[in-house]
Image (tube, grey):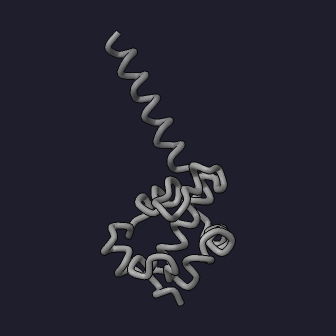
Amino acid sequence: MKRVLSGAFLAVTLLSVSSLSTQAAPDLAVGQKVFNANCAACHRGGKNTVSPQKTLSLADLKKNQRDNSAAIIALVTNGKSPMPGFGKTGKLKPAEIESVAAYVLAQANKGWK
């Protein structure tokens, strides 16, 4: 019985690891397209027209603890007033949110040039 459970655990672990490695990486071109269509009205060039102290610059992302993909994905998905939750509303799919998060980080690291 112990060998069967160990084998089952190993099989599940291997399947989990292999599925993680086959997931597509975020697409920066898709992220740029999603950003321009949904985010640029308030965040063009990494700015923030609603809350000027919360720009998408790397310094402000760090200061506001949003300088990693997981934090940006959570914010875009769930929103935080006045920003809507694009994932909760179904406006953006998870892959689009991951791509826009990667795009925002890439642009922040380049200084939004």
In this rendering, the answer to whether 38 lies above or below 40 is above
Side of 68 relative to 49 (left or right): left
In this rendering, the answer to whether 111 lies above or below 51 is below
The residue most toward the top is: 1
Quadrant position of the N terminus in the picture: top left
The residue most toward the bottom is: 113
Q: Nearer the viewer, residue 68 or 65?
A: 65
Side of 32 relative to 81 (left or right): right
Q: Nearer the viewer, residue 21 or 67?
A: 67
Residue at the spot 64% in from the left edge and 56% down from the top edge:
92
Q: Where residue 24 sits: x, y (%)?
A: 60, 56
Q: Where residue 53 sits: x, y (%)?
A: 38, 80
Residue at the spot 61% in from the left edge and 66% down from the top edge:
27
Residue 42: quadrant of the picture: bottom right
Residue at the spot 40% in from the left edge and 29% down from the top edge:
10
Q: Where residue 44 sits: x, y (%)?
A: 58, 82
Residue 6: quadrant of the picture: top left
Side of 21 relative to 61 (left or right): right
Total count of labels: 0
Residue at the spot 41% in from the left edge and 76% down from the top edge:
54
Q: Nearer the viewer, residue 82 or 56?
A: 82
